[in-house]
Image (cartoon, grey):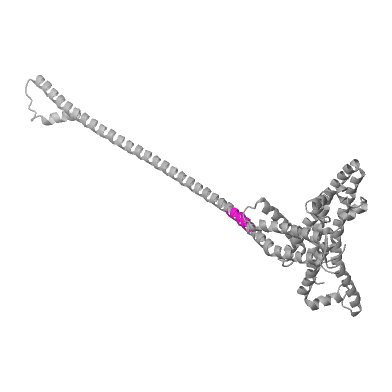
C-alpha cells in the first residue's frame, strides 16, 4: 500500500471521466428522457381531452335522440289528429250527403205521390164524371160543373 | 492451481504476496515517483468501457420507445438521478454526472474481483507476459484515495464557491459550537478532524472492502494446495464468497457514490 504517482494519474483520469460524462452522456440522455416524459404527459392529456369530448358528444347525441323522439311523437300525434279530423269530416260530409239524398229522394217521392194523386184525382174525377154521365145519361159539361168537380177532387 | 508460481517458493505467503504485488514502474528517483501500471491500465480501460458504452447508447438515444440498451442506461441514470435529487437540492447539472461517473466506474472496477484470481494470473503471465498484475484497481489505495481526494477537492471548491472564502474561514472557526472567541480553537480542531477524516474514511472504506474480498479469494485458493478434496472444497467456498461478493461490490460502489453526493451536498449547506 504505497502511495505513489498512480494517485495523481487516477485523480486526473477521474476528472476527465467526470467531465466527459457531464458533457456528452448526461445532458443528451436527460433531454431524451424529458422529451419522452413530455410526450407521455401530452398523450395522457390528449386522452383525457378525448374522453371528455366523447362524454360531451354522447350527451349531444342523447339530446338529439330525445329531440327527434319528441318531434316524431309530435308528428305522429299531429297526423293522428289530422286523420281523426279527416274521418270526422268525411263522416259529416257523408251524413250530410246522405241526408241530402234522403231528402231529395223524399222530395221526389213526395212529388211523385203528388203527381200520382193529381193523376188519380183526375182519373177519379173523370171516373166520377163518366159514372155520373152514365147515371144521368147525359153529358156533363166539365166547364159548367168545374166547381163541382173541383170540390170533389179536393175531398179526395 | 498454484503450479504457475513455480519460481516462487510454494508457500502460502509466497502465493498471496505474489498475487498482491503491483506491476510498479519507477518514473523517478523517489519511491513516490512510480506508477502502478496495472491499476492505471485496468481503471482507465474500465472507465472508457463504462462511460464509452453509455456514450454510444446516448448518441443514438431517442425520445420515443427506447431500445433495451437505452432502457438499461436510462435505468442506471434514473437511479443515480433519484439518489442525487433526494440528497442534493440545487443545480444538479454537475453533481449528477459526477455521481453517475463514480458509481459506474467504481462498480466496474470492483467487479474485477469476480474474475478468478488464479486463472487470470495464468492468462496475464502466459498471454500477456506479465508476472505481476493486480486486476482490481479499487484494491489499490492509490485509486480509492485519488477518487476520495477528487471529491474532497470538489467539496472544498463548492464550499468556497457557495459561501465565499470569508464564509469558509468563518465556518472553520465558528461552527459547530458557536462564534465565541474561546471556542475558535476547539471549532477549528473539530473541523480539521472532519476535513481529514472525510477523504480517509471515504477511500479506506472502499479499499478495505475490496482488499479484504481479494484476500479471502486468495485464502480460499490456498485450499487447492491441500489436494483434490481441498480444491473442490475451495471451489465451493469460492463460489459462495463470489455470490456474496456481488452484494459487496454493488454496495460499496453505491456507498461510495452516496458519500460523494453527501459530501458535495454538505458543502452547499451552511451550518
Question: Does residue B216 appear left or right of residue B89 in this picture?
Answer: right
Image x and y of residue B15, in percent: 89, 52
Residue in the picture at 75% in, 58% down: B45
Quadrant where the N terminus of chain A lies? bottom right
Residue in the picture at 17% in, 26% down: A120
Q: Does the magenta stretch include residue A129?
A: no
Q: Which of A16 and B93 is in front in this view?
A: A16
Q: Which of B105 and B83 is in front in this view?
A: B105
* Magenta-tinted stretch: A37-49
Residue in the picture at 87% in, 77% down: B179
Q: Nearer the viewer, residue B78 or B129?
A: B129
In the current view of this chain or complex, which residue is farthest to the front? B7
Q: Which of B2 and A22 is in front in this view?
A: B2
Quadrant where the C terminus of chain A lies? top left
Name which quarter of the figure residue B139 lies in.
bottom right
Name which quarter of the figure residue A79 lies in.
top left
Question: Does residue A129 appear left or right of residue B77 in this picture?
Answer: left
Image x and y of residue A6, in percent: 81, 64
Q: Can residue B88 be seen in this view?
A: no
State how many labels appear: 0
Question: Does residue A59 appear left or right of residue B40 in this picture?
Answer: left
Q: Does the magenta stretch include residue A47?
A: yes
- Which secondary structure is most common in the magenta stretch? helix
Q: Can residue A13 be seen in this view?
A: yes
Image x and y of residue A44, in percent: 62, 54
Image x and y of residue B171, in percent: 83, 75
- Compared to A93, does B114 lie above or below? below
Name which quarter of the figure residue B233 lies in.
top right
Amino acid at each position: 500500500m504505497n502511495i505513489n504517482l498512480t494517485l495523481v494519474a487516477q485523480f486526473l483520469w477521474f476528472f476527465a471521466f467526470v467531465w466527459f460524462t457531464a458533457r456528452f452522456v448526461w445532458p443528451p440522455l436527460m433531454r431524451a428522457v424529458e422529451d419522452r416524459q413530455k410526450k407521455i404527459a401530452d398523450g395522457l392529456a390528449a386522452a383525457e381531452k378525448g374522453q371528455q369530448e366523447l362524454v360531451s358528444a354522447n350527451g349531444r347525441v342523447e339530446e338529439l335522440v330525445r329531440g327527434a323522439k319528441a318531434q316524431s311523437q309530435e308528428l305522429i300525434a299531429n297526423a293522428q289528429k289530422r286523420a281523426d279530423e279527416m274521418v270526422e269530416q268525411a263522416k259529416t260530409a257523408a251524413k250530410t250527403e246522405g241526408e241530402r239524398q234522403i231528402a231529395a229522394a223524399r222530395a221526389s217521392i213526395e212529388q211523385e205521390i203528388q203527381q200520382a194523386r193529381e193523376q188519380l184525382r183526375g182519373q177519379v174525377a173523370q171516373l166520377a164524371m163518366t159514372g155520373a154521365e152514365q147515371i144521368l145519361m147525359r153529358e156533363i159539361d166539365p166547364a159548367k160543373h168545374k166547381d163541382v168537380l173541383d170540390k170533389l177532387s179536393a175531398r179526395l | 492451481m498454484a503450479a504457475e508460481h513455480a519460481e516462487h517458493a510454494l508457500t502460502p505467503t509466497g502465493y498471496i504476496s505474489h498475487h498482491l504485488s503491483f506491476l510498479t514502474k519507477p518514473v523517478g528517483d523517489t519511491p513516490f515517483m512510480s506508477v502502478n501500471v496495472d491499476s492505471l491500465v485496468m481503471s482507465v480501460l474500465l472507465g472508457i468501457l463504462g462511460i464509452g458504452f453509455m456514450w454510444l447508447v446516448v448518441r443514438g438515444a431517442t425520445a420515443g420507445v427506447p431500445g433495451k440498451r437505452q432502457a438499461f442506461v436510462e435505468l442506471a441514470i434514473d437511479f443515480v438521478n433519484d439518489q442525487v435529487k433526494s440528497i442534493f437540492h440545487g443545480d444538479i447539472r454537475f453533481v449528477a454526472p459526477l455521481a453517475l461517473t463514480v458509481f459506474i466506474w467504481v462498480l466496474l472496477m470492483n467487479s474485477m474481483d469476480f474474475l478468478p484470481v488464479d486463472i487470470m494470473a495464468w492468462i496475464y503471465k502466459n498471454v500477456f507476459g506479465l508476472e505481476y498484475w493486480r486486476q482490481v484497481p479499487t484494491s489499490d489505495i492509490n485509486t480509492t484515495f485519488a477518487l476520495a481526494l477528487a471529491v474532497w477537492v470538489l467539496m472544498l471548491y463548492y464550499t468556497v464557491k457557495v459561501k465565499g472564502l470569508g464564509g469558509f474561514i468563518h465556518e472553520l472557526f465558528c461552527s459547530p459550537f458557536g462564534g465565541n472567541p474561546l471556542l475558535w480553537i476547539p471549532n477549528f480542531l473539530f473541523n480539521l478532524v472532519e476535513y481529514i477524516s472525510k477523504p480517509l474514511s471515504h477511500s479506506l472504506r472502499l479499499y478495505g472492502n475490496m482488499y479484504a474480498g481479494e484476500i479471502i479469494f486468495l485464502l480460499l485458493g490456498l485450499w487447492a494446495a491441500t489436494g483434490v478434496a481441498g480444491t473442490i472444497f475451495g471451489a465451493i467456498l469460492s463460489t459462495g464468497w463470489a455470490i456474496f461478493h456481488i452484494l459487496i461490490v454493488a454496495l460499496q460502489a453505491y456507498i461510495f457514490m452516496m458519500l460523494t453526493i453527501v459530501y458535495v451536498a454538505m458543502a452547499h449547506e451552511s451550518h
